[in-house]
Amino acid sequence: MPQATVHLLRHGEVHNPDGVLYGRLPEFHLSALGREMARMLAGHFRQQVEAGARITYLAASPLDRAQETAAPTAEALRLQIHTDARIIEAENYFEGMKVSKAELRRPKHWPRLVNPLRPSWGEPYKQQASRVMEAVQEARLRAIDFAGGDYGTNGPEAIMVSHQLPIWATRLSAEGKPLWHDPRKRECTLTSITSLVFDDDGRLLRVQYSEPAASLLPGAASTPGA
């Protein structure tokens, strides 16, 4: 059986004029630039299919920004969007706040800052990586099943639209690296693709990273969701 690949796609730019950490809050939609990013990614995946890629499964986090990022690709590839709560954004104590150095100095927040290795302010990194990888393995199997053996020399592929921190935690775990990290050094830009390539037994062979919408990144908002 050809190798199967699961692409973890981060959503596009979000309309967030107040610069809050939006986390899992509802009604945070893509900005105009974010919608353009989503269309560009749809074009990228369509070109891949035209070149022989066999993309058969598409999933997205239940959050608005992920669903809206997935929509153009669903239309371009004529795929259904499967909603998967396991690839949702990380839980975060600071959700809904505008996080700044001044805010973090407030004593009421200090108990949440005592253990950055876990981290103490939100969902443990290990838990994030575990739930996402579980979803990834299921997506891998679904992509194979939906391909029905009709993929020639190209292995079946799946796309999962998720969020920066869960994707990054999953990549670190897959590469056998410590999960604690400096958030400023995550290699996971808006609408970037972190691809996990597996053998036919579901063992990870390699991780690949690409930024098909790199031309749209200059000037894009950098406020993370979590």
Image (cartoon, rainbow, N blue to C red):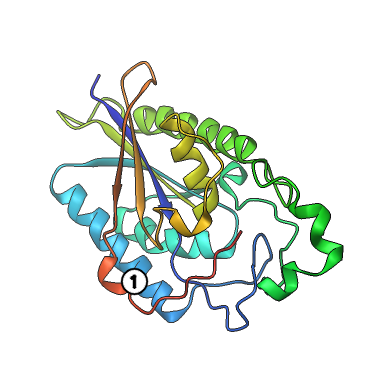
Extreme residue toward the top, this view:
201
Residue ranking furthest to the right: 108
Residue 164 point in image, percent of width and height = 50, 54
Q: Which quadrant holds residue 71?
A: bottom left
Residue in view at x 35 percent, y 74 percent: 36
Up/down of 192 relative to 154, above or below: below
The residue located at (14%, 28%) in the rendering is 153
Which of the 4 image quarters holds residue 201? top left
Instruction: Report crowding for label 1: few under 14, some 14 to 19, many 20 or more residues within 10 A (C-alpha).
Output: some
| Quadrant occupied by the C terminus | bottom right
* Residue placed under numbered mark 1 in the picture: 217
Judge whether residue 79 can be spotted in this image: yes
Amino acid tagged 1: Leu
- Where residue 118 sits in the image (x, y, percent)? 67, 41
- Residue 90 position (above or below residue 134): below
- Residue 57 placed where, x, y %? 39, 41
Point out the image quarter for the N terminus. top left
Extreme-bottom residue of the structure: 17
Q: Is residue 78 above or below residue 144?
A: below
Is residue 163 among the parts visible in the rendering? no
**What residue appears at the point 76 percent right and 69 percent down from the top-left corner?**
105
Which residue appears at 48% of the width and 46% of the height? 167
Is residue 143 or residue 108 the one in the foreground?
108
Residue 178 lies, in percent from the top left, at: 51, 35
Q: Secondary structure at mark 1?
A: loop
| Left or right: 154 in relation to 195 | left
